[in-house]
Image (cartoon, grey):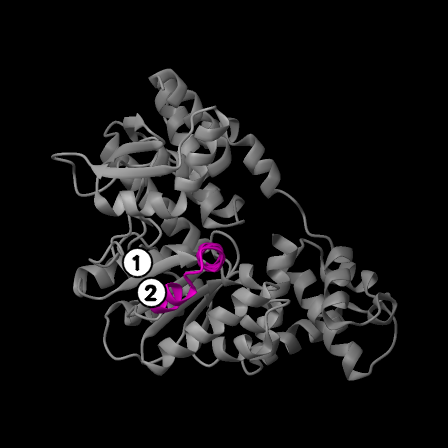
Amino acid sequence: MTNDTWTKLREDLLLHVGRNNYLTWIEPLKLTHLAEGRAEFEVPTSFFGNWVQRNFADKIRHRLNEAGIDVSRIDFSVARGAPAAPQAAVQAQPAPAPMPAAAAPRRDDEIASAPLDARFTFDSFVVGKPNALAHAAARRVAEGGPVTFNPLFLYGGVGLGKTHLMHAIAHELQLRQPHLRVLYLSAEQFMYRFVQALRERQIMDFKEMFRSVDVLMVDDVQFIAGKDSTQEEFFHTFNALVDQNKQIVISADRAPGEIKDLEDRIKSRLQCGLVVDLHPTDYELRLGVLQQKAEQYRRQMGDLVIADGVLEFLAHRITTNVRVLEGALTRLFAFANLVGRAVTLDVTQECLSDILRASDRKVTIEEIQRKVAEHYNVRLSDMIGPKRVRTIARPRQVAMYLAKQLTPRSLPEIGRRFGGRDHTTIMHGVKKVEELMATDSQLADDLQMLRRLLQG
């Protein structure tokens, strides 16, 4: 097989494994031998080779066979004088690349974590009111002392820092206690390995591998919902580790009780530890993230000039999540650098016009009323109508509160949209919800979820 043929096959693999996987695990492979049904590739490290063998060897062999190259076996050999880690991956946004799992145990042939991102450490995590509890809990777990709450369950919307904290825990554990076996992977990877073990009749090896770790970290656990056999194995793995007093850290996009099609016994298990919500960002947190990111760019580009008010403007206008915020700043600085202009407010509005337009989506009172009615399972006509029974009155007050918080409408305008009520009635409803939030945790959770639904 010529190098040109392998190059074309790699391009085909790019479409099947995704850009990040391709750049991290496929591109560094160097074909060194092909004969008698055997292909050998040179890899940077044994961990790298083991990971590719487990996760991509079948795909590579399939593509080779489709190209008319008969291969039944794929081997990997470590390059002489190779560095201790695989080559860096290039991500969609200019940034340091994900590294192989820093917390991977020494016995690479038995267990391999998913790659960790070198950027995601506690030092780079900006702490504010919305994420302070989650950060403190993650720090406690990362100290590696006696297990105090198990599992630690982190949940929240996209771009609020769940995965960042997961990676930070793994990095810190590896630094403090490198002897620990820390396994970090996504729920999809857990499911894939389980199915692979079933197919290859290695289920006992699978059980032994997962139940021999010191810390198990599973990201985006909502993806196992509805997968009965995977849930079964996850439940037994969870129980086995808890019984051994091993730490478990889980993340999801919503609270355990809100994950549809997740078995009740798993929900119960997940709720028995510390469940922490990463709330939507506030202005101070967004500004802190922007300031930290800007400082990084200043160190890289010493002549970068940022006009006063630019970061504050972005923190006010882009409220979706930190990921969108960081992406906007990356684009802005790249644009300013390429065209040789200072980062002014005019340049910001010119460069980020599409993102700013998307962030301008206005929440309407009608939309709030509809979402609240759906959430509390009441009729929209009853919410707007005169009924005063508690099951209707409380959702109505919640809708009034959200209308005051999320729209620019005046109290009289809001009153007109709620069946022509007086503005004092709206004031009373808003004040009542504010008072209840301090003592009613369920109401506070409802409001957070409704905000995410409306602003997402």
Q: Residue at x 18, y 34 (%)?
A: 79
Q: Residue at x 36, y 64 (%)?
A: 205
Q: Residue 94: in sight, yes or no? A: no
Work out which quarter of the rendered image holds the N terminus and state it. Answer: top left
Q: Nearer the viewer, residue 242 or 338?
A: 242
Magenta highlight range: 187-210
Which amino acid type is shown beneath numbered disc 2? Met
Image coordinates for residue 287, horizontal then vertical, percent: 40, 49
Which amino acid type is shown beneath numbered disc 1? Ile
Looking at this rendering, what residue extends furthest in the left direction? 81
Image coordinates for residue 161, horizontal then vertical, percent: 42, 56
Looking at this rendering, what residue extends furthest in the front direction? 36
Side of 421 relative to 411 (left or right): right
Asked which quadrant contains residue 393, the reply is bottom right
Find out whether the residues at labels 1 and 2 contact each other: C-beta distance under 8 Å: yes
Mark 2 lies on a secondary structure that is helix
Q: CA distance from mark 1 to mark 2?
A: 7 Å
Asked which quadrant contains residue 83, the reply is top left
Task: Give residue 209's mark.
Answer: 2
Task: State yes or no: residue 206 in magenta.
Answer: yes
Q: Which residue is mark 1?
A: 111
In this rendering, the answer to whether 67 lies above or below 256 is above
Q: Residue 235: in sight, yes or no? A: yes
Image coordinates for residue 82, horizontal then vertical, percent: 16, 36
Q: Residue at x 33, y 69 (%)?
A: 136
Instruction: For label 1, count other residues whose C-alpha is less than 10 Å away and answer few (under 14), some (14-19) or many (20+).
Output: many
